Amino acid sequence: MIKRILKILSTVVLVFILLLFTLYILLLTPKIQTFTAKLVTNQLSKDLGADVSLSNIRLYPLRRLIINDFLIKDKKKDTLIYISSLSLGVDSFSIKNKKVHFGLIKVHRLETKIITDSVNKSNFQFIINSFVSDKKKTSENWNYSVRAIKLEQSNIEYINADINTVKKGFDVNHVKLKNIYLYANNFKSFINYSVFLYKYT
């Protein structure tokens, strides 16, 4: 009797392992990853109200995603954010509650321009608005939070389009930061405004 029970248990465990292995193989197949990439870009485009694209996405069973050539365009269809490689660790997620809590997000080669106009409205304003709590959210929207972000070899430019570039001295209205390495943690929420502490390394 005991031997029979052990045999049944060992068979169940073996089947479970085989199922996990099959799932792992499926996640690595191009068709599944292409399908997942479409789901991700469609959902982000809907949540942000922007054109979002990527070249490919790699899924790993241990809650990790790697996205290559991640691109977000602004309302004028110009490049708002470009990331060569984006690695996302997922600490927890809930399909029922539509919540995702990311662990460490590694951003390699970020390229972005922050542009403000005469009324101090930036080209990122429409994305900020999409996360503000007083905006009506539908049940289709997901909520995201982040534990930490690490930037590597990134370039960020700030431009005040309403003010001309000065020829001498430091121009606070036209700033370029190149080859940035930054670690930021303690993100509290993406639902209202992002609150975080910086740690420079």
Image (spheres, rainbow, N blue to C red):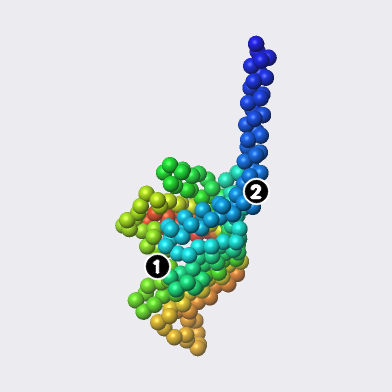
Circle 2: residue type: Leu
Circle 1: residue type: Gln
Q: Are marks 2 and 1 in contact (CB under 8 Å)?
A: no
Quadrant housing the C terminus: bottom right
Name the spot of residue 7 as percent of width and height, x first. Answer: 67, 19
Name the spot of residue 148 as percent of width and height, x first. Answer: 52, 54
Name the spot of residue 40 as percent of width and height, x first. Answer: 51, 54
> Which of the 4 image quarters holds residue 56?
bottom right
For disc 1, the marked residue is 125
The one nearer the camera, 144 or 193, is 144
In the image, residue 100 above or below residue 155 = above
Identify the mark nearer the N-term, 2 or 1: 2
Q: For residue 72, which numbered disc appears in the image?
A: none
Q: Residue furthest front?
A: 31
Quadrant housing the N terminus: top right
In the image, residue 168 above or below residue 10 = below
The one nearer the camera, 34 or 147, is 34
> Which of the 4 image quarters holds residue 132?
bottom left
Name the spot of residue 167 as percent of width and height, x first. Answer: 50, 88
For disc 2, the marked residue is 28
Q: CA distance from mark 2 to mark 1?
A: 36 Å
